[in-house]
Structures are given as structure tokens and as C-alpha cells.
Amino acid sequence: PQQTQRSLSSNGTVANVANVAGEPGTSLRQLEALAADSGALTAAILGFDSKWKVDVGRQARLVLSRTRASLRFGLRGLGIMAGDAIKAARFLGRRLQGQRLVKSELDVIRRTATDWLCLIPYTAILVFPLTPPGNVLAFNLLSRVAPWSTPSGFTRRRQDCDEMYTTVMEATGGGAGR
């Protein structure tokens, strides 16, 4: 039978991998030895060298790291918005009891209501599978047409403030009141 050969580099050495399975007199041990040689048989069949495995691992770690960062950002944003909603509910409760609210308290209520309304289109853009450039264009267009459209809990400024606040509270052993 006709032999096909493929050269590949494995740890600096070049091995010729032949289609030995079709040769008469090839034993199972010879095939196992060939397969055990730095994964050369697998690499030859699949058409890649052993460095590919390292790159896949690095890429998988990178994707996992970015996914974790995105989830942390999203969960922190939702936490900020939930804290704002609780604070706004307290202010509304005080107003319903007949107390007068100051401008900053009214601003918190207004901002919180706007944030929760803006969360709907913001989430829709995140959830619907656009291409990565499509998402970037959609967010840029949304931020230029309606700069107030990004919920404040998802802005870098609010995230950074929340992170600093959390760090200070942990360092001083302060309470959880925001």
C-alpha cells in the first residue's frame, strides 16, 4: 500500500509519521509507541503541533477571566441599583408620612426611576446576540443619542465609587449601610 507521510515538530525534533496502520506486520505495540511519542500521531491526524494545546489553555483562561470580570461588573451594577432602589423607597416612605424631602433626596428618587427604566433597553442590547462590533455600535449610538440611557449602576464612575466605598468599609470594619 502507498504510504502518506507528514512532518511535524515536537519539542524541537522532526518525526515522520507514516500511515503505518495499513502496513503488513505492524503490531499493536508499534502503533501504541507511535501514539505515545509526544502525541505525534494525534497531532498528525488533527494537523496541529503540541503548542496548540498550550494556546487553547491560555485562551480558555483568558475567556474565563473576562467572563468573570463581566459578571462581576454586571452583578455590582445590579447591586448598586438595588441599593438605590432601597434608598429611594425609604425616601418615598418618608414623603408619604408627610415629611418634606430635600433636593438631593428627590434627585436620588428621580435617578433611580430613570435607571430602572433605562435598564430595559440596556439589557435588550446586551441579551440579543449582535456581533461584537454591532454591540459596540449600538452602545455608542445609544450613549450619543441619549447620554442618560446607561443606568448609573453600570457606569465606570459608580462602579469605582462603590469599589472604593467597599474597600474603605472593609478596612475600617464599618457597617454595611450605604
Image (cartoon, rainbow, N blue to C red):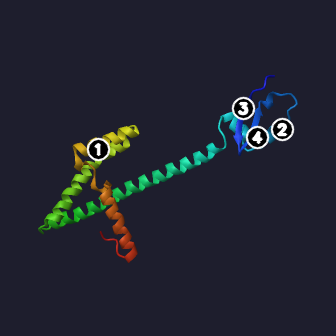
Residue at (14, 68) in percent of width and height: 97
Residue at (34, 74) in percent of width and height: 175
Whole-percent x, y for residue 34 in the image: 79, 39
Q: Is residue 27 left or right of residue 19?
A: right
Q: Amino acid at mark 4?
A: Ala
Dot 2 corresponds to which residue?
Answer: 30
Dot 4 corresponds to which residue?
Answer: 35
Q: Amino acid at mark 1?
A: Pro
Q: Secondary structure at mark 3?
A: strand
Task: Look at the image and tell me in which quarter the N terminus lies.
Answer: top right
Q: Amino acid at mark 3?
A: Arg
Dot 1 corresponds to which residue?
Answer: 121
Whole-percent x, y for residue 104 in the image: 17, 64
Label located before the other in sequence (3 or 1): 3
Residue at (18, 57) in percent of width and height: 110
Label located before the other in sequence (4 or 2): 2
Whole-percent x, y for residue 149 in the image: 25, 48
Q: Is residue 19 left or right of residue 118?
A: right
Dot 3 corresponds to which residue?
Answer: 6
| Label 4–label 1 contact, CB within 8 A | no
Say which of 96 and 53 sits in front.
53
